[in-house]
Image (cartoon, rainbow, N blue to C red):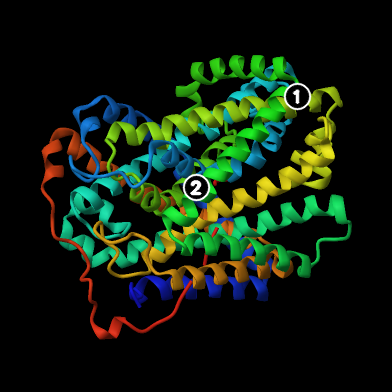
């Protein structure tokens, strides 16, 4: 095999996931009770840390951007970019929050409209609640989540390309604890972070299959059966595994480019055919409220009033982003070679946040408008039929709804695939030895196929026979360790801010390209979600 297996990363992740599936199958209620209790303990005891950490990452990003570190080139002054700036942006956009943004921007504002925090004394369904709902969407989906992804991605890019480290999540801690300690604990760190990603991918794939099945039922009728779910999951898995296995340039870039263009077309259609003036006006007004309350809302934990709204929404989101950030950082960092730190911040935070803000103005504004016109019609769909039906119901109010819902189904499919292929690419690399800054960076195609099959199988079993909540809860449990990894990794930026010259001193920390024979034999694999 070109890139032999790292058994201490592959097998623990696979066996823990298998044990979780078996436990949830034997006694789902007990399994959910335990996982929900653990989630609640984490959110109750560490809400302050999630809020403070996410806010500090935004501040740290701003400091780095305007510092001399911003001029450092990833890979050195002579490094050649892997991708053009436009393709780089499209890949970064489609592999982070695009899937979540597609669906949640229509449903989530309805939750905030009719269930604002009790401590803020906002009447549900009021004009104040409408402004609150929109401003909350900007808080949850723009600068802060992208900062959570950006910081570890930037650290990994500089460690991997400038310090010539190995392809590992643990490598991000090298500037803080040294190369030798990183080599000793890298396998454990990679396993913890990868498990959160694999569980999240299985959860997202199952949720995506349910969403696509709900859309298909509007055309072909019938119930969502295990067979229908199996067929949908199989098509998604085959597509994203083929994309990931074909490599960065052939598969992932082309699919992300296509996905970006069709999302732009969809957004333009809704902007032109929907309540354009209302969407833009409410969006601009709500951006003002978001900026005005950014500091207080970012650090809002509800402790003084006993309000648990932040734990249910904002802090929960930070936990999800932190769970995904360490592994996503490997892919985002890998594709940043040849550009400066400042350009990296543009492409991985500022431009995607602007795109998402415009998307929120269009889709959240449209959802709130049609809900008000129908006296709470979309909210009734949300409560009676579920999140996945709100977007389709909103499109029923627009021209050519039959054609556009079919187009929406296609976009949903492509969006799930583009989010999954980059994660599968990273999973394959993490489980492989010998992936270095000087290699082709594509890892083992076989491992990507194996993980794709495992993730597809797990998501089908959970969604068809057990319930997807079990895997989703497991994914969320990765928030605390993910946050600790990101915070420790962010210390590297503080060290480099004081002495950027350290990035010109490469260390020899690569794994040997030819591992001992004992490490050559073993098989492996899972994969999928963005963001909420």
Q: Which label sits on residue 289?
A: none
Question: In the image, what residue occupies the spot 50% across and 73% down?
Answer: 450
> Could you tell whether 134 is left or right of 143 in the image?
right
Extreme residue toward the right, this view: 221
Q: How many badges with numbers are in the image?
A: 2
Q: Residues within 10 Å of mark 1 (few under 14, many from 20)?
A: many
Residue 515 appears at what percent x and percent y?
A: 24, 77
Q: Nearer the viewer, residue 102 or 382?
A: 102
Question: In the image, what residue occupies the spot 86% across and 25% down?
Answer: 375
Question: In the image, what residue occupies the spot 37% across and 44% down?
Answer: 83
Residue 463 is drawn in which quadrant? bottom right
- SS for tag 1? loop
Q: Which label sits on residue 95?
A: 2
Residue 186 appears at what percent x and percent y?
A: 28, 63
In the depicted structure, whether residue 487 falls above or below residue 284? below
- SS for tag 2? loop
In the depicted structure, whether residue 207 falls above or below residue 388? below
Q: Nearer the viewer, residue 457 or 46?
A: 457
Q: Residues within 10 Å of mark 2 (few under 14, many from 20)?
A: many
Q: CA distance from mark 2 to mark 1?
A: 28 Å
Which tag, 2 or 1, sits closer to the chain's start? 2
Residue 289 appears at what percent x and percent y?
A: 56, 17
Residue 474 is drawn in which quadrant? bottom right
> Could you tell whether 165 is left or right of 44 in the image?
left
Residue 194 appears at what percent x and percent y?
A: 43, 61
User: Quarter holding the N terminus?
Assistant: bottom left
> Could you tell whether 57 is left or right of 361 in the image?
left
Q: Which residue is mark 1?
A: 274
User: Quarter holding the C terminus?
Assistant: top right
For the question of whether residue 30 can be seen, the reply is yes
């Amino acid at each position: 095999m070109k890139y032999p297996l790292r058994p201490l990363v592959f097998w623990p992740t696979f066996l823990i996931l298998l044990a979780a599936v078996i436990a949830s199958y034997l006694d789902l209620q007990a399994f959910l009770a335990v996982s929900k209790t653990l989630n609640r303990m984490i959110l109750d005891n560490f809400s302050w840390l999630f809020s403070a950490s996410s806010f500090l990452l935004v501040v740290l990003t701003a400091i780095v951007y305007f510092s001399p570190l911003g001029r450092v080139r990833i890979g050195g002054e002579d490094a050649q970019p892997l991708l053009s700036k436009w393709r780089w942006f499209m890949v970064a956009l489609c592999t982070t929050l695009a899937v979540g943004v597609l669906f949640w921007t229509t449903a989530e504002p309805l939750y905030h409209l009719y269930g604002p925090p009790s401590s803020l004394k906002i009447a549900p369904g009021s004009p104040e609640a409408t402004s609150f709902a929109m401003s909350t969407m900007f808080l949850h989906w723009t600068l802060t989540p992208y900062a959570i992804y950006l910081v570890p991605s930037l650290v990994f890019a500089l460690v991997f390309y400038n310090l010539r480290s190995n392809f590992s999540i643990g490598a991000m801690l090298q500037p803080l604890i040294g190369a030798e300690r990183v080599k000793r604990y890298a396998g454990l760190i990679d396993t913890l972070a990868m498990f959160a990603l694999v569980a999240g991918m299985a959860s997202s794939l199952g949720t995506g299959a349910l969403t696509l099945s709900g859309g298909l039922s509007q055309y072909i009728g019938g119930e969502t059966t295990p067979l229908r779910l199996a067929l949908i999951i199989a098509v998604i898995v085959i597509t994203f595994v083929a994309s990931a296995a074909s490599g960065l340039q052939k598969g992932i870039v082309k699919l992300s480019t296509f996905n970006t263009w069709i999302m732009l077309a969809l957004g333009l259609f809704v902007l032109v055919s929907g309540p354009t003036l209302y969407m833009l006006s409410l969006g601009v007004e709500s951006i003002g409220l978001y900026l005005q309350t950014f500091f207080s809302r970012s650090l809002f934990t509800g402790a003084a009033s006993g309000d648990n709204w932040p734990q249910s929404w904002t802090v929960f989101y930070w936990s999800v982003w932190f769970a995904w950030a360490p592994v996503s950082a490997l892919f985002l960092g890998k594709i940043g070679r040849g550009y400066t730190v400042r350009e990296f911040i543009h492409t991985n935070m500022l431009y995607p946040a602007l795109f998402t803000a415009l998307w929120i103005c269009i889709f959240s504004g449209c959802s709130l408008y049609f809900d008000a016109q129908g006296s709470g019609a979309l909210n009734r769909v949300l409560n009676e039929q579920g999140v996945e039906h709100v977007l389709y119901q909103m499109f029923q109010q627009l021209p050519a709804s039959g054609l556009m819902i079919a187009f929406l189904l296609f976009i949903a499919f492509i969006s799930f695939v583009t989010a999954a292929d980059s994660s599968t690419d990273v999973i394959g690399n993490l489980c492989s030895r010998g992936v270095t800054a000087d290699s082709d960076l594509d890892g083992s195609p076989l491992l990507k196929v194996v993980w794709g099959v495992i993730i597809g199988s797990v998501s089908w079993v959970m969604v068809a026979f057990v319930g997807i909540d079990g895997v989703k809860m497991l994914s969320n449990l990765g928030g605390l360790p993910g946050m600790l990894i990101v915070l420790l990794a962010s210390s590297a930026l503080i060290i480099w801010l004081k002495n950027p010259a350290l990035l010109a001193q490469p260390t020899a920390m690569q794994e040997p390209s030819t591992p001992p024979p004992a490490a050559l034999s073993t098989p492996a694999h899972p994969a999928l979600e963005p963001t909420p």
